[in-house]
Image (cartoon, grey):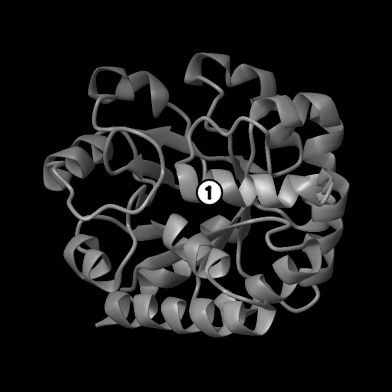
Amino acid sequence: MLNRIDEKFNELKLKNRKALITYLAAGDPDIEATSVLVKEMVSRGADIVEIGIPYSDPVAEGPVIQRAHSRALSKKIKISDIMGIVKTVRKSVNVPIIYLVYFNCILQYGVDKFFNDLNITGVDGIIIPDLPFEERWEVDEFAARHNVHVITLVSPTSENRLSKMLKNPKGFIYCITSLGVTGMRNEFNTDFEHFIKTVKKYTSLPTALGFGISAPEHIRRLKDFSDGLIVGSAVVKKIEDSKNLNEALEKVGAFVSDLKGALDT
Protein backbone atom coordinates (compact mmCIF):
# COMPACT_ATOMS: atom_id res chain seq x y z
CA MET A 1 0.00 0.00 0.00
CA LEU A 2 1.44 3.37 -1.02
CA ASN A 3 1.65 6.13 1.49
CA ARG A 4 1.79 9.84 0.76
CA ILE A 5 5.58 9.84 0.31
CA ASP A 6 5.37 7.29 -2.51
CA GLU A 7 2.44 9.09 -4.08
CA LYS A 8 4.19 12.48 -3.95
CA PHE A 9 7.39 11.28 -5.62
CA ASN A 10 5.37 9.43 -8.27
CA GLU A 11 3.35 12.59 -8.94
CA LEU A 12 6.49 14.73 -9.21
CA LYS A 13 8.18 12.23 -11.51
CA LEU A 14 5.25 12.37 -13.91
CA LYS A 15 5.58 16.16 -13.93
CA ASN A 16 9.38 15.99 -14.33
CA ARG A 17 9.78 17.98 -11.11
CA LYS A 18 11.87 17.67 -7.96
CA ALA A 19 10.66 17.65 -4.34
CA LEU A 20 11.21 20.56 -2.01
CA ILE A 21 11.39 19.24 1.55
CA THR A 22 11.39 21.81 4.34
CA TYR A 23 12.00 21.38 8.07
CA LEU A 24 10.96 23.05 11.29
CA ALA A 25 11.25 22.11 14.95
CA ALA A 26 7.89 21.43 16.57
CA GLY A 27 7.06 23.93 19.29
CA ASP A 28 9.36 26.68 18.05
CA PRO A 29 8.38 29.36 18.86
CA ASP A 30 5.33 27.58 20.30
CA ILE A 31 3.11 24.63 19.45
CA GLU A 32 0.31 26.68 17.90
CA ALA A 33 2.82 28.43 15.62
CA THR A 34 3.95 25.05 14.30
CA SER A 35 0.55 24.48 12.74
CA VAL A 36 0.39 27.78 10.86
CA LEU A 37 4.06 27.59 9.80
CA VAL A 38 3.52 24.14 8.29
CA LYS A 39 0.49 25.40 6.39
CA GLU A 40 2.41 28.46 5.18
CA MET A 41 5.32 26.36 3.88
CA VAL A 42 2.94 24.08 2.02
CA SER A 43 1.04 27.01 0.52
CA ARG A 44 4.35 28.44 -0.72
CA GLY A 45 5.46 25.25 -2.42
CA ALA A 46 6.86 22.71 0.05
CA ASP A 47 6.17 19.23 -1.30
CA ILE A 48 7.04 17.40 1.93
CA VAL A 49 7.35 18.78 5.46
CA GLU A 50 9.80 17.41 8.00
CA ILE A 51 8.99 18.14 11.65
CA GLY A 52 11.68 17.79 14.28
CA ILE A 53 10.66 16.32 17.63
CA PRO A 54 12.51 18.41 20.26
CA TYR A 55 15.15 16.48 22.19
CA SER A 56 17.64 17.47 24.87
CA ASP A 57 20.66 16.00 23.06
CA PRO A 58 20.09 16.27 19.29
CA VAL A 59 23.50 14.95 18.25
CA ALA A 60 22.92 15.30 14.48
CA GLU A 61 21.92 18.95 14.71
CA GLY A 62 23.98 22.10 14.39
CA PRO A 63 23.61 25.14 16.67
CA VAL A 64 20.60 26.68 14.88
CA ILE A 65 18.39 23.62 15.30
CA GLN A 66 19.80 22.87 18.75
CA ARG A 67 18.61 26.29 19.88
CA ALA A 68 15.18 25.62 18.36
CA HIS A 69 14.95 22.37 20.31
CA SER A 70 15.90 24.21 23.50
CA ARG A 71 13.27 26.89 22.90
CA ALA A 72 10.60 24.25 22.32
CA LEU A 73 11.59 22.20 25.36
CA SER A 74 11.47 25.31 27.54
CA LYS A 75 7.73 25.41 26.75
CA LYS A 76 7.34 21.87 28.17
CA ILE A 77 6.21 20.52 24.80
CA LYS A 78 5.24 16.85 24.69
CA ILE A 79 5.10 14.40 21.78
CA SER A 80 1.35 14.05 22.39
CA ASP A 81 1.04 17.81 21.78
CA ILE A 82 2.85 17.44 18.46
CA MET A 83 0.65 14.52 17.47
CA GLY A 84 -2.38 16.68 18.16
CA ILE A 85 -1.07 19.53 16.03
CA VAL A 86 -0.36 17.22 13.10
CA LYS A 87 -3.86 15.77 13.39
CA THR A 88 -5.24 19.30 13.15
CA VAL A 89 -2.96 20.19 10.22
CA ARG A 90 -4.12 17.09 8.38
CA LYS A 91 -7.60 18.61 8.04
CA SER A 92 -6.25 21.05 5.45
CA VAL A 93 -2.83 19.71 4.38
CA ASN A 94 -2.33 16.56 2.33
CA VAL A 95 1.41 16.64 1.58
CA PRO A 96 3.61 13.99 3.23
CA ILE A 97 4.70 14.76 6.79
CA ILE A 98 7.83 13.23 8.27
CA TYR A 99 9.11 13.31 11.84
CA LEU A 100 12.80 13.61 12.60
CA VAL A 101 12.97 11.96 16.00
CA TYR A 102 15.67 10.59 18.29
CA PHE A 103 15.30 6.98 19.31
CA ASN A 104 15.01 7.59 23.05
CA CYS A 105 11.87 9.64 22.40
CA ILE A 106 10.30 6.63 20.69
CA LEU A 107 11.32 4.30 23.52
CA GLN A 108 9.90 6.61 26.17
CA TYR A 109 6.62 6.96 24.25
CA GLY A 110 6.40 3.20 23.60
CA VAL A 111 7.44 1.84 20.21
CA ASP A 112 4.16 0.25 19.11
CA LYS A 113 2.07 3.13 20.49
CA PHE A 114 4.35 5.62 18.72
CA PHE A 115 3.93 4.06 15.29
CA ASN A 116 0.21 3.48 15.84
CA ASP A 117 -0.24 7.16 16.71
CA LEU A 118 1.81 8.21 13.68
CA ASN A 119 -0.65 6.34 11.51
CA ILE A 120 -3.68 7.78 13.29
CA THR A 121 -2.46 11.38 13.13
CA GLY A 122 -1.27 11.20 9.52
CA VAL A 123 2.52 11.06 9.74
CA ASP A 124 3.94 9.21 6.73
CA GLY A 125 7.57 8.62 7.63
CA ILE A 126 10.27 9.07 10.23
CA ILE A 127 13.98 9.76 10.27
CA ILE A 128 15.88 8.43 13.30
CA PRO A 129 19.38 9.92 13.06
CA ASP A 130 20.82 8.13 16.10
CA LEU A 131 19.53 4.63 15.28
CA PRO A 132 22.26 2.67 13.44
CA PHE A 133 21.16 0.68 10.42
CA GLU A 134 22.13 -2.53 12.20
CA GLU A 135 19.54 -1.79 14.90
CA ARG A 136 16.67 -0.88 12.58
CA TRP A 137 15.02 -4.20 13.37
CA GLU A 138 13.84 -2.55 16.61
CA VAL A 139 11.37 -0.42 14.67
CA ASP A 140 10.92 -1.94 11.20
CA GLU A 141 8.19 -4.39 12.23
CA PHE A 142 6.10 -1.67 13.86
CA ALA A 143 6.65 0.76 11.00
CA ALA A 144 5.51 -1.80 8.43
CA ARG A 145 2.44 -2.69 10.50
CA HIS A 146 1.32 0.94 10.57
CA ASN A 147 2.39 1.93 7.03
CA VAL A 148 5.06 4.38 8.17
CA HIS A 149 8.27 4.64 6.18
CA VAL A 150 11.55 4.64 8.08
CA ILE A 151 13.80 6.79 5.90
CA THR A 152 17.35 5.55 5.38
CA LEU A 153 20.17 8.06 5.77
CA VAL A 154 23.39 7.55 3.81
CA SER A 155 26.50 9.69 3.64
CA PRO A 156 29.44 9.96 1.24
CA THR A 157 31.34 7.63 3.60
CA SER A 158 28.65 4.90 3.46
CA GLU A 159 29.77 3.48 0.11
CA ASN A 160 31.15 0.20 1.49
CA ARG A 161 27.91 -0.46 3.40
CA LEU A 162 25.32 0.62 0.84
CA SER A 163 24.56 -2.89 -0.39
CA LYS A 164 23.35 -3.75 3.13
CA MET A 165 21.80 -0.40 4.04
CA LEU A 166 19.72 -0.27 0.87
CA LYS A 167 18.35 -3.81 0.83
CA ASN A 168 14.77 -2.83 1.59
CA PRO A 169 14.53 0.96 1.93
CA LYS A 170 11.25 2.87 2.08
CA GLY A 171 10.05 6.24 0.82
CA PHE A 172 13.25 7.89 -0.35
CA ILE A 173 16.94 7.87 0.46
CA TYR A 174 18.18 10.81 2.54
CA CYS A 175 21.61 11.54 1.11
CA ILE A 176 23.74 13.63 3.48
CA THR A 177 25.66 16.25 1.51
CA SER A 178 28.74 16.33 3.74
CA LEU A 179 30.15 15.12 7.02
CA GLY A 180 29.18 16.78 10.29
CA VAL A 181 25.95 18.07 11.74
CA THR A 182 23.11 20.01 10.15
CA GLY A 183 23.62 23.69 9.48
CA MET A 184 24.01 26.32 6.80
CA ARG A 185 27.05 25.98 4.53
CA ASN A 186 28.68 28.10 1.86
CA GLU A 187 30.50 25.32 0.02
CA PHE A 188 29.98 21.64 -0.77
CA ASN A 189 32.99 19.44 -1.54
CA THR A 190 31.20 16.16 -2.21
CA ASP A 191 31.31 14.57 -5.66
CA PHE A 192 27.51 14.43 -5.90
CA GLU A 193 27.41 12.77 -9.30
CA HIS A 194 29.47 9.84 -8.02
CA PHE A 195 27.62 9.76 -4.68
CA ILE A 196 24.11 9.58 -6.14
CA LYS A 197 25.17 7.24 -8.93
CA THR A 198 26.56 4.84 -6.33
CA VAL A 199 23.35 5.00 -4.29
CA LYS A 200 21.31 4.31 -7.42
CA LYS A 201 23.21 1.07 -8.00
CA TYR A 202 21.35 -0.43 -5.07
CA THR A 203 17.87 1.13 -5.18
CA SER A 204 15.37 2.64 -7.55
CA LEU A 205 13.86 4.79 -4.80
CA PRO A 206 14.06 8.58 -5.10
CA THR A 207 17.01 10.35 -3.50
CA ALA A 208 16.99 13.63 -1.59
CA LEU A 209 20.02 15.71 -0.63
CA GLY A 210 20.12 17.36 2.78
CA PHE A 211 22.41 19.02 5.38
CA GLY A 212 23.64 22.51 4.61
CA ILE A 213 21.33 23.46 1.74
CA SER A 214 20.33 26.96 2.73
CA ALA A 215 19.83 29.24 -0.27
CA PRO A 216 18.20 29.31 -3.71
CA GLU A 217 21.66 29.21 -5.33
CA HIS A 218 22.34 25.91 -3.54
CA ILE A 219 19.08 24.57 -4.95
CA ARG A 220 20.06 25.61 -8.47
CA ARG A 221 23.48 24.01 -8.11
CA LEU A 222 22.32 20.69 -6.65
CA LYS A 223 18.87 20.03 -8.12
CA ASP A 224 20.11 18.02 -11.11
CA PHE A 225 21.79 15.43 -8.89
CA SER A 226 18.78 14.12 -6.94
CA ASP A 227 15.00 13.81 -6.85
CA GLY A 228 14.57 16.17 -3.93
CA LEU A 229 16.33 18.77 -1.78
CA ILE A 230 15.97 19.27 1.97
CA VAL A 231 16.25 22.67 3.64
CA GLY A 232 16.23 22.81 7.44
CA SER A 233 18.50 25.14 9.40
CA ALA A 234 17.91 28.07 7.06
CA VAL A 235 14.15 27.85 7.65
CA VAL A 236 14.64 27.57 11.40
CA LYS A 237 16.94 30.62 11.36
CA LYS A 238 14.17 32.68 9.73
CA ILE A 239 11.91 31.73 12.63
CA GLU A 240 14.60 32.48 15.20
CA ASP A 241 15.28 35.93 13.73
CA SER A 242 11.61 36.95 13.75
CA LYS A 243 10.13 39.17 16.45
CA ASN A 244 6.70 37.56 16.29
CA LEU A 245 4.69 34.93 14.44
CA ASN A 246 3.49 37.27 11.69
CA GLU A 247 7.07 38.19 10.86
CA ALA A 248 8.08 34.52 10.93
CA LEU A 249 5.26 33.63 8.55
CA GLU A 250 6.30 36.39 6.17
CA LYS A 251 9.99 35.46 6.24
CA VAL A 252 9.48 31.71 6.02
CA GLY A 253 6.83 32.00 3.32
CA ALA A 254 8.96 34.26 1.12
CA PHE A 255 12.01 32.02 1.62
CA VAL A 256 10.16 28.82 0.71
CA SER A 257 8.71 30.57 -2.35
CA ASP A 258 12.23 31.55 -3.44
CA LEU A 259 13.50 28.00 -2.93
CA LYS A 260 10.60 26.62 -4.94
CA GLY A 261 11.25 29.09 -7.73
CA ALA A 262 14.89 28.01 -7.90
CA LEU A 263 13.86 24.35 -7.98
CA ASP A 264 11.29 24.74 -10.74
CA THR A 265 13.33 26.91 -13.14
Q: In the orientation shown, which residue stands out farthest toward the top?
A: 134
Instruction: Kindly tell me whether residue 18 is visible in this rendering.
Output: yes
The residue type indicated by label 1 comes to Ile
| Mark 1 closeness class: few <14, some 14–19, many ≥20 residues within 10 Å | many
Q: In the orientation shown, which residue stands out farthest toward the front?
A: 243
Which image quarter: residue 111? top right
Residue visible at 57% across and 15% down?
A: 135
Q: Nearer the viewer, residue 263 or 8?
A: 263
Rendering coords of residue 160 (x, y %): 24, 17
Instruction: Kindly tell me whether residue 232 is visible in this rendering.
Output: no
Rendering coords of residue 208 (x, y %): 36, 52
Residue visible at 84% across and 69% down?
A: 88
Rendering coords of residue 143 (x, y %): 69, 35
* Vertical arrangement, residue 250 with respect to residue 87, above or below: below
75 vs 179, left or right, is right
Q: Nearer the viewer, residue 63 or 138?
A: 63
99 vs 130, left or right, is right
* Vertical arrangement, residue 137 with respect to residue 202, above or below: above
Residue visible at 50% across and 72% down?
A: 46
Residue visible at 67% across and 44% down?
A: 148
Rendering coords of residue 149 (x, y %): 60, 42
Number of dots carrying numbers:
1
Q: Secondary structure at mark 1?
A: helix
58 vs 56, left or right, is left
The residue carrying mark 1 is 65
Which image quarter: residue 27? bottom right
* Image quarter in which the C terminus is found: bottom left
